[in-house]
Image: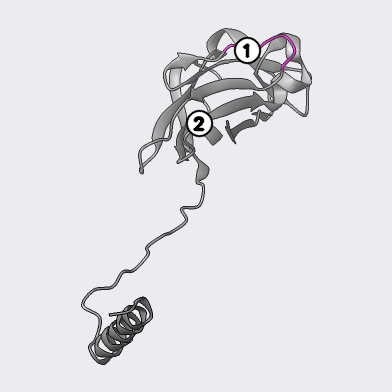
Amino acid sequence: MSRSNSRKSTLALVFGLACVFALYPDTSGSISLSGNQLGILEISVTAEPTASDLPLDTTVVDLKVGTVTERSNKKAGYTVTLSSASALFAASFGPALRSSETADFLSYSIKYGGTAVAFPLSGIAVVVSNVSAKTTAAGTVNVVSVSFDGASAFLDEAVYADILTLTIIAK
């Protein structure tokens, strides 16, 4: 057989097989699966009823005033900062329950997740969580507690308040 006839025979065979396979359905196939998980970076702050009815005339140690749930799927992790409106106002005194009616105040300390929070003299926000991984699906729960010596303070008759702000930031 000549080279030309061999080529024609091969082409005819390939064409014939293609026609035969076209008559039968495929015996396999594939599905490409993909998805996109959006980033989760959440903080949930729940105040205890005692937070708005503090016993200012007594000495209190580690009184639970709130619960914070940190939830994140960021691989690099996140930080949580805590700031006190009164500490920002008068940084040299740290956090305090202040009266808007008088100049009186009651200094207090804070624990976050059982660890004492130390405010710098600048009064800026303090990092209370520094996490280098994602949380569980349920998140990480931390208790916020306060301590103060109201029994020794003998405060003016007034309403005393402070605002704690917690912020979660992705790394």
Residue at left offset 25%, top offset 81%: 26
Q: How many marks?
A: 2
Where residue 25 sits in the image (x, y, percent)?
24, 86
Q: Hey, which quadrant is residue 114 in on the image? A: top left
Q: How is the image coloured?
A: one colour
Q: Dot 1: within a 10 Å radius of its alpha carbon, few (fewer than 14), some, or many (20 or more) residues?
A: few
Bounds of the magenta span? 118-123
Q: Earlier in the sequence, mark 2 or mark 1?
A: 2
In what element is the residue under mark 2? loop
Instruction: Determine the residue positioned at 30% across, 83% down.
Output: 9
Taking the view exactly as shown, the residue that stands out farthest to the front is 2
Spatial CA distance of label 2 from label 1 is 48 Å
Residue 44 rendering spot, x and y as whole percentages: 50, 42
**Dot 2 corresponds to which residue?**
76
Residue 108 disc label: none
Q: Look at the image and say whether residue 131 sits in the magenta stretch.
A: no
Side (left or right) of 11 relative to 28: right
State if disc 1 and disc 2 touch (CB < 8 Å): no
Residue 154 at what x, y percent from top left? 63, 12
Q: Mark 2 belongs to which amino acid?
A: Ala
Location of residue 129 with respect to 73 vertically, above or below: above
Asked which quadrant contains residue 1, the reply is: bottom left
For the C terminus, the quadrant is top right
Query: Residue visible at 35% across and 82% down?
Result: 11
Judging by the rendered image, the residue that carries numbered circle 1 is 154
Q: Amino acid at mark 1?
A: Phe
Q: Tell me where residue 81 sits by quadrant.
A: top right
Q: Residue at x 72, y 9 (%)?
A: 121
Q: Is residue 122 magenta?
A: yes
2 or 1: mark nearer the eye: 2
